Image (spheres, grey):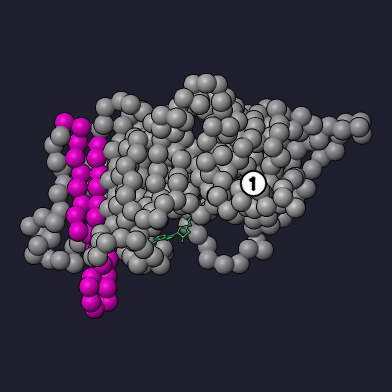
Amino acid sequence: MIISHITLKNWRNFKEIDVSLNDRIFVVGPNACGKSNFLDVFRFLRDLATPGGGLQRAIRERGGVSKIRCLSACQNPQIEIAVSLSEEPHSAIQWKYAIGIKQEARGNRQPYLSYEKVARSDGKVLLSRPDQEDQKDKLRLTQTHLEQISANHAFRDIAKLFESVLYLQLVPQLLRHPDSFIGVNVSEDPFGKNFLERVAKTPEKTRHSRLHKIQEALGIAVPQFKKLELIKDDLGIPHLQARYEHWRPGGGFQHEDQFSDGTLRLIGLLWSLLETDSLLLLEEPELSLNAGIVKKIPSLMYRLQQRKKRQLIISTHSEALLSDAGIGGEEVLLLTPEQEGTKVQAVGSVKDLRDLLEGGLTIAEAVLPRTIPPKIERFQQLSLLK
Ligand SMILES: Nc1ncnc2c1ncn2[C@@H]1O[C@H](COP(=O)(O)OP(=O)(O)O)[C@@H](O)[C@H]1O
Ligand SMILES: [Mg+2]
């Protein structure tokens, strides 16, 4: 199942957006236009549905309602999120889930639900809060039904989908030296701190097969890279090991602390693609990779994905990545900052962009010029005049 549609009101720098989502979505736009904020909505839904987490924690971890709520919102605004879930893109909607969030006007200014609604494909409304119980006890509105196993029985599918959302922004240094990282232990491990542990915990047969697939896929990008496996050192600590074929006969073995940043990020990314079939959020997968390899990311993903039907939402700046001719206009969301908030459009729904794509341009050629802030253009013109 995928999230096939989303509407947001007053979510960070998005005052109001309403877009359909494909099973693969590239989120594209200039710096600080809200790409990470857009990805964060899906993490927020995950946090809501996580037992022991829920509404209060999800908001607290983001610094409170005032940090999330759009700064250019009108008076007394609520934050609203509504999603539709479908088996696949363009197929019938199976579920709709919607919430509105407000904050108490005084006292300890606790966040609460102004509404929570669940509807099924046949139009039957399974939940519409505030209900009578909520009227009797207002404190109930400080929790969603999504976060309560005893209350979400009738729509467990929604809770399960949200709960399994995975977010990745791999930091090679953390993959290599997890113990040197002091700081809050984030439960979702977005930066790959526990990556090697996760690989080590995977049953041997599955692990072997995944590492083999990754090694084959990586071979396209890094041809010298051979035989990727997991080994344990004398202390029992897991390490990745690969053989590099080079001029020395037999080649040399290298461990993860010697892999390049890009290779490590790619291994982490490909492993995550193989690991689950849940919604995967990828933050700028192009970082620390050279353009030649970035160009191959879409086809690497496609190869590894073939048998899995899962949704991928990828934020990117990368010209190389978006020059893949296989990326269609309906797979790209263009974020454009405007006075009141960022506008979000599916590239395929913008007539002149669609014309450019039909004329044979790639997404990189058609769309990226629109993500360059005007000031940079002026700067370039000025430097040409010198
Ligand atoms: N509550 C909010 N209301 C309006 N704008 C916000 C809010 N929270 C964050 N922003 C803005 O969002 C921008 C950062 O968005 P971000 O998702 O990090 O951008 P990107 O990932 O595209 O670089 C900043 O300009 C920040 O001011
Ligand atoms: Mg960002």
Mark 1, other Cα within 10 Å: few <14 / some 14–19 / many ≥20: some
**Residue at x-position 14% and y-position 56%:** 130
**Horizontal arrangement in the rendering, residue 5 relative to residue 382 (left or right):** left
Q: Quadrant of residue 52?
A: bottom left
Residue 317: percent from left, percent from top? 58, 43
- Nearest the viewer among 288 and 206 is 288
Outermost front residue = 385
Residue 58 seen: no
The type of residue carrying mark 1 is Leu
**Horizontal arrangement in the rendering, residue 333 relative to residue 96 (left or right):** right
Which residue is identified by label 1? 287
**Residue at x-position 31% and y-position 32%:** 86
**Residue at x-position 71% and y-position 33%:** 292
- Quarter that holds the N terminus: top left
Outermost top residue = 359
User: Is 72 placed above or below 383 here?
Assistant: below
Q: Quadrant of residue 155?
A: top left
Magenta part, dominant SS = strand
**Horizontal arrangement in the rendering, residue 220 relative to residue 163 (left or right):** right
Residue 119 seen: yes
Magenta range is 95-122
